[in-house]
Image (cartoon, rainbow, N blue to C red):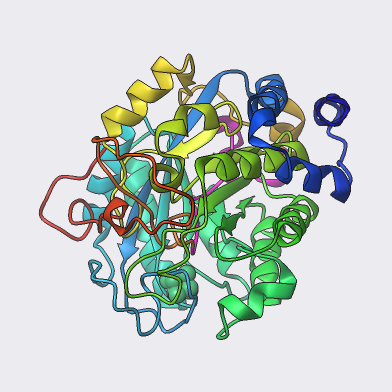
Amino acid sequence: MDLLNTLVDKGLRRELPTREEALAVLATSDDDLLDVVAAAGKVRRHWFGRRVKLNYLVNLKSGLCPEDCSYCSQRLGSKAEILKYTWLKPEDASRAAAAGLAGGAKRVCLVASGRGPTDRDVDRVSRTIKAIKDENEGVEVCACLGLLSDGQAERLRDAGADAYNHNLNTSESTYGDITTTHTYADRVDTVQKAHAAGLSACSGLIAGMGESDEDLVDVVFSLRELDPDSVPVNFLIPFEGTPLAKEWHLTPQRCLRILAMTRFVCPDVEVRIAGGREVHLRSMQPLALHLANSIFLGDYLTSEGQAGKADLDMIADAGFEVEGADRVTLPEHRAARDCGSHPSAGCGSAGDTGCGGHDAGGCGSHEGGGICGSAPAPAPAADEPRPDLVAVRRRGAGTDLAPNA
Ligand code: SF4
């Protein structure tokens, strides 16, 4: 297909596709899906080989958020029966992080619900970063604490943070339909603050919130312009008790097309499959590894993922390898750029990305996606609600039970 040949050529040259080309990827038929995956897979392998970076989420503070992000189980007024707790102590967060690192993760993503941190919160998170870094040599730490005020990104960088995550989530034109308590511009501003402070910026999206193909292309093009090092792609987890509980529109094929489009538009960036991986890709997860070079290991913020061992087995079975702490994630031209501007951010260790972020219906953000265990579910028809695929997290951070890693 001419379209795919063109997109591969552009991806290998880091050239931006046209909007029409990006839209055409989303419009491909199921008959063409494997060709789309193969083409985007060439771009993925050119920049990242067969490596898969594993990231581990630690939810530092869960629920009780005053913001109203519709996709989020921690939002104001959420009836989702998630774990709710206030700040974890640094030693407890460090213990949770250690479990993820022992399971193969190289980055720890420290996430807290809320509009944004107070200066006291930044002190607290700084102590947590120190505790994790003291115990785990070479670990990358990404913070995801919401909207940043002036000076806070610099303080996090000075405390040892490598990256900061804040997702754009959706297009500027539909942002107001999803959240009313802050704006798209607020989110852009925080990503820019992270960048300016020399932190590796991580910013992504949530698909499945009723957006159009144009919205998806808009947000991915906006991300390319913001130039984060990592882009988490969340697939909405329609939590019972949230306004988007009935938004079950994604199919595995649609998820693969969205990941392929993201790879073509952001060819040399860490594309991470974030919340909703198990819920929406289901048995097609291994194909998604040909598109994304990064996933979360184990559980999400408020929902459970498949067993950490199942993640590792899937990677091995699909012919990929877990990226070691000694490998730099980003291609040389990107890693070198970060090294220059990122004095304390662990450029040697690669650098990029952060956790899903402050949001996502899935984790990607603040939320979490998830499920689910190992028992494969029968393939549902498109649009058929599957709340049985969403398991609220009941283990790990904030509980007495061992984390999934
Ligand atoms: S995404 Fe973050 S800011 Fe929005 S409601 Fe959830 S916890 Fe609050």
Residue 291: percent from left, percent from top = 61, 31
Task: Give the tally of numbered discs.
Answer: 0
Q: Is residue 62 above or below residue 38?
A: below
Residue 343 visible within the image = no
Q: Which residue is nearer to you in this view: 208 or 157? A: 208
Q: Is residue 295 above or below residue 249?
A: above
Query: Which residue appears at 43% of the width and 77% of the height?
Result: 243
Residue 275: percent from left, percent from top = 44, 51
Residue 3 visible within the image = yes
**330 horizontally vs 279: left or right:** right
Given the current orientation, which residue lies at the most extreme left position?
400
Q: Main secondary structure of the magenta part?
A: loop
**Residue 399 is one of the magenta-drawn residues:** no
Query: Which residue appears at 21% of the width and 51% of the height?
Result: 396
Q: Which residue is nearer to you in this view: 378 or 186? A: 378
Query: Which residue appears at 34% of the width and 46% of the height?
Result: 132
**142 horizontally vs 154: left or right:** left
Residue 364: percent from left, percent from top = 48, 54
Given the current orientation, which residue lies at the most extreme front position?
381
In which quadrant of the rendered image does the C terminus lie? top left
Q: Is residue 346 above or below residue 323?
A: below
Which quadrant would residue 79 be assigned to in this image? bottom left
**Residue 345 is one of the magenta-drawn residues:** yes
Which quadrant would residue 180 be assigned to in this image? bottom right
Chain part drawn in magenta:
340-359
Residue 187: percent from left, percent from top = 64, 70
In which quadrant of the rendered image does the N terminus lie? top right
Query: Which residue appears at 59% of the width and 45% of the height?
Result: 254
**4 horizontally vs 250: left or right:** right
